Amino acid sequence: MRSTTVDASLLEACLTAAIAAPSIFNTQPWRFRLAPETVTLQVLAAPERGLRHMDPTGRALHLSVGASVFNLRVSVAHFGWHAVTRLLPSPDDPELLATVRLTGPASRPATGRRGDLYEAIGRRHSSRFPFSGRPLPPQLCAELTEAAHTEGALLTFPAVAETDRLLRVTAEAEHRNRTDHDRAAESRRWIHRDPDALTDVGLPQTALGPQDAHERLPMRDFTAQRHTERLTARPFETKPVIALLTTEHDRRADWLRAGQALQHLLLVATVHGVRTSLLHQPMEWPDLRRSLSSTPGLMGHPQMLIRLGYGPDGPATPRRVAPLDTGPTGLRGD
Ligand SMILES: Cc1cc2nc3c(=O)[nH]c(=O)nc-3n(C[C@H](O)[C@H](O)[C@H](O)COP(=O)(O)O)c2cc1C
């Protein structure tokens, strides 16, 4: 039988990758625990960093944690280990969202697609700046669709008229977010006021892009200004590439799958030099979210709108160090 002793530095590298995942408002709503006897990394929700007004059901929290689980899987494979991932493994422990059990060293180093995505984890950042308007090659769209499919989700690239409709629904959601007192206040709480603040959650000012001067792309105004004319505006791409991520069902496990699918396709995009940003606003209003799924011929529950294109890289946002809870027995670093 092969040994399943894992080097502590490997676990540390895997955790660094896990926390590089995108999360709603950079809340980083995850915690990690190690069960040393089974070499299992447990991924738990951190509900204290949930968004009470914008995400009352915790759907976006699950998406964020799902993205983190995908990074864990990629890094474990990158370091040459086999792992078995289970979602919601314990009905008695609703905060335990996933386990990643390292089952033994792989006989060959990871050469598959998932292992190859490791280097992209640290390079991927949300880019909320105007893109060039250069279209994505159809082959890449197929690869992104395949990435989502591998994780149990569906990715569609709507045609121009449908893209316009999705963006109009997003604009309505953005308008509501700005004018809803509780949501606007919640949004502002996650923005760093002081540019030099050493805050390790939330968004620094440098990560916030301008608004679209054409008023076509409803980029999220994290500062939730009522008077949008006061915000900086620049012309964005006139033919935005928007993809819609959906899942067949809409349970907690589907949200976690959607998060893994999201991160899988974002990393594939990064490998190909494609920048991304997310338009989640319509998912935060049940009626608007429902109206997205009325897309002709589209099945499933909308989970995310993704904007893709060629343009400036987004700046890195801070991360809090997520200490690994090793339980009473601890971990031997051998
Ligand atoms: C569920 C979810 C919803 C998000 N919604 C938005 C959004 O509406 N607008 C946006 O610009 N970014 C959105 N983001 C991106 C986060 O703001 C971003 O991941 C976080 O600030 C960390 O920055 P990074 O992606 O550059 O690492 C979302 C991310 C997740 C996982």
Image: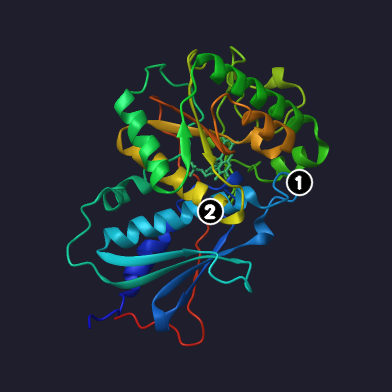
Quarter containing the C terminus: bottom left
**Quadrant of the rendered image containing residue 261:** top left
Picture quarter with ligand 1: top right
- Residue with the most extreme left position: 108
Could you tell me which secondary element the residue under label 1 belongs to? loop
Identify the residue at image location x=76%, y=40%. 183
State the image coordinates of residue 83 (x, y, percent, origin top left): 35, 66
Occupied quadrant, residue 294: top right
Front-lying residue, 45 or 10: 45
Per the image, the residue denoted by label 1 is 53
Indicate which disc residue 225 carries: none
Residue under pointer 2: 256
Q: Secondary structure at mark 2?
A: helix
Give the side of residue 131 with respect to residue 333, left or right: right
Q: Residue at x 65, y 34 (%)?
A: 281
Left or right of residue 3, residue 182 in this image: right
Q: Amino acid at mark 2?
A: Leu
Precedes in sequence: disc 1 or disc 2: 1
How many residues crowd mark 2 within 10 Å: few (<14), some (14–19), many (20+)? many
| Callout 2: CB less than 8 Å from ligand 1 | no
